[in-house]
Image (cartoon, rainbow, N blue to C red):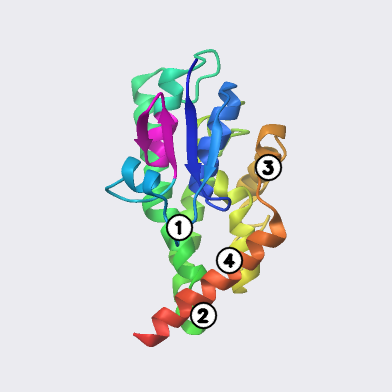
């Protein structure tokens, strides 16, 4: 019998990617919730380099970093529901845009969320520019991966819920139907897929957490 364990926090959007992938593949797994303020010895053992979640443990072997885990899941289980395309060029392109999300889009949105006043207005511009780039990737498609969800939808999945949380807790407005009609349509389609919808964390708890997190980052910035 296979042993599959997922080390995560209840609120991490990166860990949610792995939850979605495992559910899409129909894989049973055990969830181990971590407190990042008091990391377990197992988390430090299985991810000694970054000491972060998510970590997937498969038959005793740890796999770290959410995008790496998604590829591992796709390579290991249920080839009838692939996350990545078969074509090498399409696979490379998919990896490129997933990396764009993690290295450019998400950091730009997070920077705007953890800013205020004039600094927030300045931080808003690159976030909007990156969202405009993402918008172009949805032309003629229901999902980033086509007619069904795939790797890129899981990578960009945080937009469907967390971006709204960032907006509410910081007072910034990034998404609207006039400027981003394709993202807004994708957002509704993705959010309401049963496997996705049932996995979202409690919204009130997320709002509370991200309010506190924003206050912390603002206090750190002002103390410098």
* Magenta-span inclusion, residue 179: no
Residue 157 percent location from the top left of the image: 56, 43
Q: Which residue is mark 3?
A: 191
**Rendered image: mark on residue 36:** 1
**Mark found first going from the N terminus, 3 or 4:** 3
Label 1 neighbour load within 10 Å: few <14, some 14-19, many 20+: few
Q: Position of residue 205 (x, y in %)?
A: 67, 60
Observer-nearest of 75 and 100: 75
- When asked about the image quadrant of residue 111, the answer is bottom left
Seen at 48% across and 27% down, the residue is 4
Residue at the (42%, 50%) spot, across then down: 40
Foreground mark, 1 or 3, reads: 1
Distance (Cα) linking label 1 and label 3 = 27 Å
Please report the bounds of the magenta region as a residue range. 54-71
Pointer 4: what residue?
210
Q: Is 76 located above or below residue 180 in the figure?
A: above
Residue at x 70%, y 40% (from the top left corner): 197
Q: Secondary structure at mark 1?
A: loop
The residue at which mark 2 appears reads as 116
- Mark 1 or 3 closer to N-term? 1
- Measured Cα–Cα span from mark 3 to mark 4: 20 Å
Q: Please identify the quadrant where the C terminus is shown.
A: bottom left
C-alpha gap between disc 4 and disc 2? 15 Å
Of callouts 2 and 3, the N-terminal one: 2
Instruction: Report crowding for label 4: few under 14, some 14 to 19, many 20 or more residues within 10 A (C-alpha).
Output: many
State the separation of the CA atoms marked 4 and 1. 15 Å
């Amino acid at each position: 019998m296979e042993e599959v364990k997922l080390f995560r926090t209840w609120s991490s959007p990166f860990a949610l990617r792995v939850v979605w992938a495992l559910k899409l593949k129909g894989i049973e797994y055990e969830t181990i919730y971590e407190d990042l303020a008091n990391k377990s010895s197992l988390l430090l053992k299985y991810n000694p380099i970054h000491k972060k979640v998510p970590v997937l443990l498969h038959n005793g072997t740890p796999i770290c970093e959410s995008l790496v885990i998604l590829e591992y899941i796709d390579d290991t289980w249920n080839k009838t529901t692939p996350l990545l395309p078969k074509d090498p060029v399409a696979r490379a392109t998919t990896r490129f845009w997933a990396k764009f999300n993690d290295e450019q889009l998400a950091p730009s949105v997070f920077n705007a969320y953890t800013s205020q006043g004039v600094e927030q207005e300045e931080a808003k511009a690159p976030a909007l520019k990156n969202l405009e780039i993402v918008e172009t990737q949805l032309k003629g498609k229901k999902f980033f991966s086509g007619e069904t969800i795939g790797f890129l939808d899981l990578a960009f999945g945080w937009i469907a819920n967390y971006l709204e949380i960032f907006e509410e807790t910081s007072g910034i407005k990034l998404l609207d139907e006039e400027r981003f009609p394709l993202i807004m349509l994708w957002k509704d389609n993705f959010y309401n897929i049963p496997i996705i919808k049932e996995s979202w964390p409690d919204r009130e708890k997320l709002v509370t957490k991200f309010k506190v997190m924003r206050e912390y980052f603002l206090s750190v910035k002002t103390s410098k």
